[in-house]
Image (cartoon, rainbow, N blue to C red):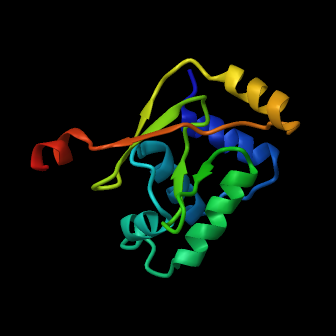
């Protein structure tokens, strides 16, 4: 059985993306991370191994992964974008205190997309569901 990393490498290879050491490290970090990191998080985590790498390099490589369908960008108002390498249908729970984002599974709400299309005339391409509250650690403090 091939790993998610090997599948990702194969997908990049078929789209003609050259695998640099920095790109390799960023992709591995994303696939191993369940924390939905920001570009700055990735930069800080890999900075010791790649001292010449800039935040712009991280962003540029994330854009390559997004364009290749390997990573999803999660934007939240004025906050930094977060990046998710889990491309399956899933939703997010977000802590209003510490900002942690946790995946949760639920039957995809395709009926919401159909209703939105019927009521608005939009050609719906997808949706995003987020629940907000306090994670278990923050709930203990509050």
Residue 104 image-quadrant placement: top left
At 19% across and 48% down in the image, what residue appears?
A: 138
Residue 49 image-quadrant placement: bottom left
User: What is the residue that sits farthest to the left in this orientation?
Assistant: 141
At 53% across and 58% down in the image, what residue appears?
A: 76
Q: Position of residue 91 (x, y in %)?
A: 51, 33
Left or right, 61 with respect to 22, comes to right
As drawn, 95 above or below 79: above
Query: Where the N terminus falls, by quadrant?
Result: top right
As drawn, 106 above or below 65: above
Q: Position of residue 132 (x, y in %)?
A: 39, 43
Q: Position of residue 83 (x, y in %)?
A: 53, 53
Count up the numbered dots.
0
Q: Position of residue 120 (x, y in %)?
A: 83, 37
Left or right, 45 with respect to 139, comes to right
Nearer the observer, 118 or 46: 118
Residue 102 image-quadrant placement: top left
User: What is the residue that sits farthest to the front in this orientation?
Assistant: 119
Left or right, 52 with respect to 69, comes to left
At 64% across and 35% down in the image, what residue appears?
A: 7
At 49% across and 50% down in the image, what residue appears?
A: 30
As drawn, 41 above or below 128: below
């Amino acid at each position: 059985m091939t790993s998610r990393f090997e599948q990702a490498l194969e997908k990049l290879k078929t789209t003609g993306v050259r695998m640099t050491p920095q790109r390799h490290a960023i992709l591995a970090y994303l696939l191993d991370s369940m924390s939905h990191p920001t570009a700055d998080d990735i930069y800080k985590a890999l900075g010791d191994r790649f001292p010449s790498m800039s935040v712009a390099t991280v962003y540029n490589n994330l854009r390559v992964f997004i364009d290749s369908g390997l990573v999803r960008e999660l934007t939240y108002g004025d906050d930094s974008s977060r990046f998710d390498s889990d491309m399956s249908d899933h939703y997010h729970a977000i802590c209003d205190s510490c900002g942690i984002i946790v995946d949760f599974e639920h039957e995809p709400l395709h009926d919401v997309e159909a209703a939105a299309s019927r009521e608005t005339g939009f050609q719906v391409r997808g949706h995003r569901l987020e629940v907000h509250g306090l994670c278990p650690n923050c709930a203990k403090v509050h």
